[in-house]
Structures are given as structure tokens and as C-alpha cells.
Image (tube, helix red, strand yellow):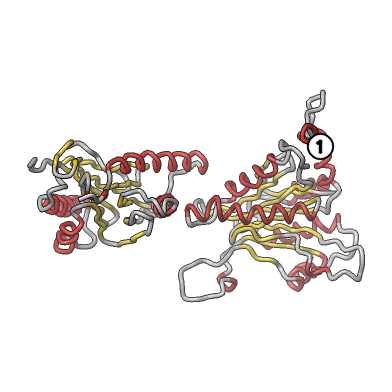
């Protein structure tokens, strides 16, 4: 009868709350601040990679990940949970979409697939919800538009023009409200993202301590071959040098 | 004799014109040499710009019509837009390959115009989903050999919708008259960017 006690930990409290989900959101609130900004010609996903020791080799720790050639994802909260979701998202993009339609999913469909995984972890027995909020940015081929979504541990998702999650998300969002406008360009968006991060970064604000990706124009040089009409991936990580150059011009 | 592809008979064809496509099929349903119906439509309208024609075993034709309609309706609900012809082709391909070792006994044809620039698209498939892309014409069914003969001699590129209708009709009509298992009427769809014209053709009934 051991399975009698293995029901879901996320049971409604008498007041109608699912406290486990609220605790998961608290885990996110303690996480490193992460910024997402969408503009006409791209999306920026930016976060800090914190290291509490100078002995750590920091540049192997990636926090903004490639999901499909046109979709990237980052997080605030628990790193290990994020890596599980990255693996699942990549696989879902293939099995539930590319292998059926021979094209990659639009951002909304990808977000719905990820949200489904996160929702199921709030209603299944023997497991806990994911301790992360995600920012998913990407480009839709069918309407030629960029998209930015946030996905929460409950499985809710929201489309944003610009947003922040994690420790200083409230002040960062206030900052973004002032800085975001309809004719923001990608270069400005990277600037704004760095300025927003500047407020939350405790240590030195240098390229080596930041993880930034942009989804913008097709990067044909990343394709690995030439002479076809196939577009390169739009997802591109910024190098530490590129970030430092931008920081110098702040 | 017991080939499921030629049990019920039938023929279908698609052609590309200038900013338009045509897709057509006969209307016969038979049990080997015995004619059963002269009103067996083998073409489905997937949406206002995309059409699917199915020849082969009639029971599978009916099942696949419903299956693809179901899948494209679900696609429209999920994506909030109509499916593109090339996407539809890949959906059909993967649906057919799912049954790799016990296939549907059908040879589908897809014809449509892309949403963005109304670029004509046609393609055919074998019964396990290999896509046969084409930029002129695609044929399928028991009159395949005859249809190829007619298309090779009648087809020319960049026909306007009226001339394309004439070409595809003559190709189909004269092909099915040389096939005992096809004919008994025909239906032709001409798809242009702003309208679809359906014409039912009268043919000899013997």
C-alpha cells in the first residue's frame, strides 16, 4: 500500500492555493535576474552567470540555450531543472513537430509544448514542480515576426515586449517600461538589457560574467556549408569580447 | 487481379499554370470490371487554396480523406492559420510512412498555392509517403501510363487558368478513355489566388 501515500504533493490548500507552486515561484524569485527584450528586428535574452569562486571555470556554464535554429531559451531559478527542460524542449521540437511537418515549430507552439510539461509536473504524483521561470524568444517564419514568452512553474505563459524574471525583476521591469518603445532596434535592445542587468549584478559587469543571445537575422556562417538557399540559424550567442565592446560604449 | 491499387479503379492529375494550379479526377468507383458508382469524388478541399486528390483502394481513399481533414482541422485550431501546401505535403508524407509495413493502398496528389506569394505547388506520393515534387504535372491512379502520355504531349508551361483547364481536361478525358477502370465522369478544380472554379465534365458512360 506504499502507493497510497504517493499522491501529488501539489494538493489544493483550503484557501484555494497550490502552495507548492507558490514555493516554486519563490525559488524563481531567488534566482539570478534574467532579461528578455523583443524589438522589430530581433529578440535579446540576457542573464548573469554567477560564480562564487575565482577558481571556477566560468565560460563552460551556459544559461541561454539553443532550442531550434530560430528559438532560444533562458531561465531564472534552479539550473538543473532548466537543463531538464532544455532537453525536453529540444526533443519535443523534433518529435512533435519537425518529424511531422518537416519544419520547426513556431514560438507559440514551442512554448505551449514546454508549458504542457511544466503543467503536468503540478498534477502528477511523486514529483515536484519545476523551480524555474523561462524566457523563450524566437522568430516565426509564417508571419515573419519575433516573439518573446515567459513560462512559469504552474505552466502559465505570457507574451511580452520586454520583461525580467528573478531576484530584481520588479525594479528591472520598471526600468524596461521606461526604456522600451515601438521603434527600438536590436542594438538598442542589447544596450537596454545590459543597463537593466547592471542594477542587479553584484560583481564586476564584464562579458565573461554575462550570458547573452540574440535571435535576429539568419546567420549563414553558422550553417557549416555554402551554396544552398537554406537560411542559417537566427539564434546566436554573443562572445565575451562582443559584450565587452558594447559595455565600453555604455 | 488482386492488386488493391487497381481493385476500384480511378485516376487523378494536377498541373501547374501561370499563378494557378488545376487538380482533377475521374468519378468512377468499381469492383474490378463492374462499375458501381459514377459519383465517387476523389478530391478534397483542405482549405481555400489547397486540394488533395486520392486514388487507389476506395476504402482507404475514404479513410484518408477523413484522416487528413481531421489533421488539418486540428492544425488550423492550433496554429490559427491555414496549412501551407508544402507543410500539408510533409504531413501527408509522415502520415503515410507511419504505416510503412502495412500501408494505405493509395497514391495521393497535393495541389495548392502558398499563402504568402501564391506560388503554385503540386506533388505526388507513393503509398509509403515518398514525395514526388514537380513543377509541371503529377498523375496517379490506374490510368497513370495513359495520363503521362497525354501530359507529355499536351502540357506547356505558364498557361493561364482557362487554357490550363482545357489542357488538364483533355489530358484526363483522353487518358481515362483508354483505361477500362477509370472514367464515368470527371471533375476539375482550377485554383487561382482569388477564386476556385469547379467544373464537372460529362464523359462517355461505357
Image quadrant containing the C terminus of chain B:
top left
Mark 1, Cα crowd under 10 Å, few <14 / some 14-19 / many 20+, is many
Q: Which residue is mark 1?
A: A20
In the figure, residue A90 lies in which quadrant? bottom right
Task: Tell me: residue A221, above or below residue B21.
Answer: below
**Residue A33 screen position, x and y as percent:** 81, 53
The front one of A240 and A121 is: A121
Q: Is residue B39 above or below residue A42?
A: above
Q: Residue B7 location in percent, x, y?
A: 22, 46
How many labels, in total? 1
Quarter of the view holding residue A189: bottom right
Residue at image position (35%, 48%) is B104
Residue A134 percent location from the top left of the image: 72, 49
Q: Report the side of A217 relative to B192 (left or right).
A: right
Residue A170 in picture, x, y percent from top left: 82, 45
- For residue B187, above or below residue B172: above
Point 13% across, 51% down: residue: B179
Q: Residue at x 59, y 63 (%)?
A: A234
In the image, residue A146 sits, relative to residue A156, either above or below, namely below
Give the letter of the chain under mark 1.
A
Residue sitting farthest toward the top: A14
Secondary element type, mark 1: helix
Judge left or right: residue B205 versus residue B22.
left
**Residue in the image at 26% along x and 43% along y:** B42
Nearer to me, A239 or A114:
A114
Q: Is B86 on the left-hand or right-hand side of A100?
A: left
Left or right of A189? Residue B1 is: left
Which residue extends farthest front? A1
Amino acid at each position: 500500500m506504499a502507493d497510497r501515500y504517493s499522491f501529488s504533493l501539489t494538493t489544493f490548500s483550503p484557501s484555494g492555493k497550490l502552495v507548492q507552486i507558490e514555493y516554486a515561484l519563490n525559488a524563481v524569485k531567488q534566482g539570478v535576474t534574467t532579461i528578455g527584450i523583443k524589438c522589430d528586428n530581433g529578440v535579446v535574452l540576457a542573464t548573469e552567470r554567477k560564480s562564487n569562486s575565482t577558481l571556477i571555470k566560468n565560460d563552460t556554464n551556459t544559461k541561454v540555450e539553443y532550442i531550434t535554429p530560430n528559438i532560444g531559451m533562458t531561465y531564472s531559478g534552479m539550473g538543473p531543472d532548466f537543463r531538464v527542460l532544455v532537453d525536453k524542449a529540444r526533443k519535443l521540437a523534433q518529435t512533435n513537430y519537425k518529424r511531422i511537418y518537416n519544419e520547426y515549430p513556431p514560438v507559440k507552439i514551442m512554448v505551449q509544448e514546454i508549458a504542457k510539461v511544466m503543467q503536468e509536473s503540478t498534477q502528477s504524483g511523486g514529483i515536484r514542480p519545476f523551480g524555474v521561470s523561462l524566457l523563450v524568444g524566437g522568430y516565426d517564419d509564417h508571419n515573419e515576426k519575433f516573439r518573446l514568452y515567459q513560462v512559469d512553474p504552474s505552466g502559465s505563459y505570457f507574451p511580452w515586449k520586454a520583461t525580467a524574471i528573478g531576484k530584481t525583476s520588479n525594479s528591472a521591469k520598471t526600468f524596461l517600461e521606461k526604456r522600451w518603445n515601438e521603434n527600438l532596434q536590436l542594438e538598442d535592445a542589447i544596450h537596454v538589457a545590459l543597463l537593466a542587468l547592471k542594477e542587479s549584478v553584484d560583481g564586476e559587469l564584464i562579458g565573461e560574467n554575462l550570458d547573452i543571445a540574440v535571435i535576429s537575422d539568419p546567420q549563414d556562417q553558422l550553417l557549416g556549408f555554402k551554396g544552398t538557399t537554406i537560411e542559417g540559424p537566427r539564434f546566436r550567442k554573443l562572445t565575451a569580447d562582443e559584450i565587452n565592446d558594447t559595455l565600453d560604449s555604455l | 487481379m488482386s492488386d488493391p491499387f487497381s481493385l476500384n479503379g480511378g485516376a487523378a492529375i494536377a498541373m501547374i499554370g501561370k499563378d494557378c494550379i488545376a487538380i482533377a479526377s475521374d468519378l468512377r468507383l468499381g469492383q474490378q470490371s463492374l462499375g458501381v458508382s459514377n459519383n465517387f469524388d476523389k478530391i478534397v478541399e483542405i482549405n481555400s487554396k489547397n486540394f488533395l486528390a486520392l486514388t487507389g483502394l476506395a476504402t482507404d481513399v475514404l479513410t484518408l480523406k477523413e484522416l487528413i481533414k481531421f489533421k488539418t482541422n486540428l492544425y488550423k485550431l492550433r496554429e490559427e492559420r491555414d496549412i501551407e501546401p508544402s507543410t500539408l505535403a510533409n504531413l501527408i508524407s509522415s502520415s503515410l510512412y507511419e504505416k510503412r509495413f502495412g500501408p494505405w493502398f493509395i497514391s495521393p496528389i497535393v495541389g495548392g498555392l502558398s499563402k504568402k506569394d501564391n506560388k503554385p505547388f503540386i506533388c505526388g506520393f507513393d503509398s509509403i509517403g515518398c514525395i514526388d515534387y514537380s513543377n509541371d504535372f503529377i498523375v496517379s491512379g490506374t490510368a497513370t501510363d495513359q495520363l503521362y502520355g497525354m501530359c507529355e504531349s499536351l502540357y506547356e508551361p505558364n498557361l493561364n487558368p482557362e487554357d490550363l483547364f482545357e489542357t488538364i481536361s483533355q489530358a484526363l478525358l483522353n487518358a481515362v478513355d483508354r483505361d477500362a477502370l477509370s472514367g464515368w465522369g470527371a471533375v476539375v478544380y482550377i485554383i487561382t489566388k482569388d477564386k476556385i472554379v469547379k467544373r464537372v465534365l460529362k464523359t462517355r458512360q461505357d
